[in-house]
Amino acid sequence: MDYYEISFTYESLLPTDIINDILASELGNIGFDSFLPEDDRLLAYINADNFNEQSLNDCLSHFPLQGNRFFHARQLIKDRNWNEEWEKNYYRPIIIADECLIRASFHPEEKGFNYSIVIDPKMAFGTGNHATTYLMLHELLKLDLHDKSFLDMGCGTAVLAILAAKKGASRVVAVDIDEWAYNSANENCRLNHTEQVEVARGDAEQIARFGAFDYIFANINRNVLIKDVHLYVPALKPGGSIFMSGFYREDVPAIEEACHHNGLSLCASTERERWVAVHVR
């Protein structure tokens, strides 16, 4: 599958990391699915078939913070060995709560962790390096999943589903609409010997066919979560919980309002680098 790599630079009085984070969040709403922040720019990737120049221009013209000027350059990237690209340039192992190690297959094994997960990201989002994935993994580590059912909605690499399986969940389902993510999730489940994870391709409409869950984790973005939360609720067992991330602290009121309209109440929230994860019931 071919991708467009778009390099974004900008003139702004704000720190680069803040612009990178907000820009990535906005781009995620129009189909971009992978981001590589650098010191002076943001590289963003989108399936070539999903790219729309007008949508991109509209996104930049409606950027939520004023006083910024954006520049971008686009190049088509043919299908390639993405693991090799990540190994050479970007991906590094990460440790969650001194308990879980996430590494790529090209990293050496390390001992001393309760859970060791191999993730080859390719073009799918979710290695643990991003704040939202880190937050969700951290929340997942706190849970007792024995004899519990678990849904990883918008699974990306399926790192959450894999950890849930390793923690003893009785049934794990991982769903993503993106073909890259679907293929990556299947491959990563094989790498981690968690083939019991059911991986499906599709949007939130797919949830109903899998029945109900004790836990639903959805790490996507604000707009998709608000749009789809009404589909999560019927799939939640009595007493179950939903964990959501992919948005900033400023978005929490909108998320909470959407949850309230669907009979859910906010139990707790955690934050990392201005990104937030919420727990609702």
Image (tube, rainbow, N blue to C red):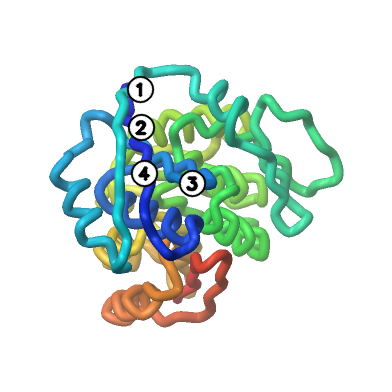
Which residue is label 4 attached to?
Answer: 8
- Whichever of labels 2 and 3 marks the residue nearer the N terminus, that label is 2
Q: Which quarter of the figure has residue 73?
A: top left
Residue 257: % across, % down: 31, 80
Q: Select label 2 or label 3 by which is in front.
A: 3
Q: Pointer 4 and pointer 1: residues touching (CB < 8 Å)?
A: no
- Whichever of labels 4 and 1 marks the residue nearer the N terminus, that label is 4
Which residue is label 2 attached to?
Answer: 5
Q: CA distance from mark 3 to mark 4?
A: 9 Å
Residue 61: % across, % down: 20, 57
The crowding category of the residue bearing disc 2, from other C-alpha atoms within 10 Å (few below 14, some 14 to 19, many at least 20), is many
- Whichever of labels 3 and 4 marks the residue nearer the N terminus, that label is 4
Q: CA distance from mark 4 to mark 1?
A: 16 Å
Q: Is residue 250 above or below residue 35?
A: below
Q: Is residue 175 above or below residue 64?
A: above
- Whichever of labels 1 and 2 marks the residue nearer the N terminus, that label is 2
Name of the residue lying farthest toward the right: 112
Secondary element at image label 1:
strand
Q: Is residue 41 above or below residue 260?
A: above
- Whichever of labels 3 and 1 marks the residue nearer the N terminus, that label is 3
The crowding category of the residue bearing disc 3, from other C-alpha atoms within 10 Å (few below 14, some 14 to 19, many at least 20), is few
Residue 177: % across, % down: 31, 41
Q: Is residue 14 above or below residue 169?
A: below
Residue 6: % across, % down: 34, 36
The crowding category of the residue bearing disc 1, from other C-alpha atoms within 10 Å (few below 14, some 14 to 19, many at least 20), is some
Residue for point 17% across, 53% down: 58
Residue nearer the viewer, 183 or 56: 56
The crowding category of the residue bearing disc 4, from other C-alpha atoms within 10 Å (few below 14, some 14 to 19, many at least 20), is some
Residue for point 34% across, 63% down: 222
Which residue is label 3 attached to?
Answer: 40
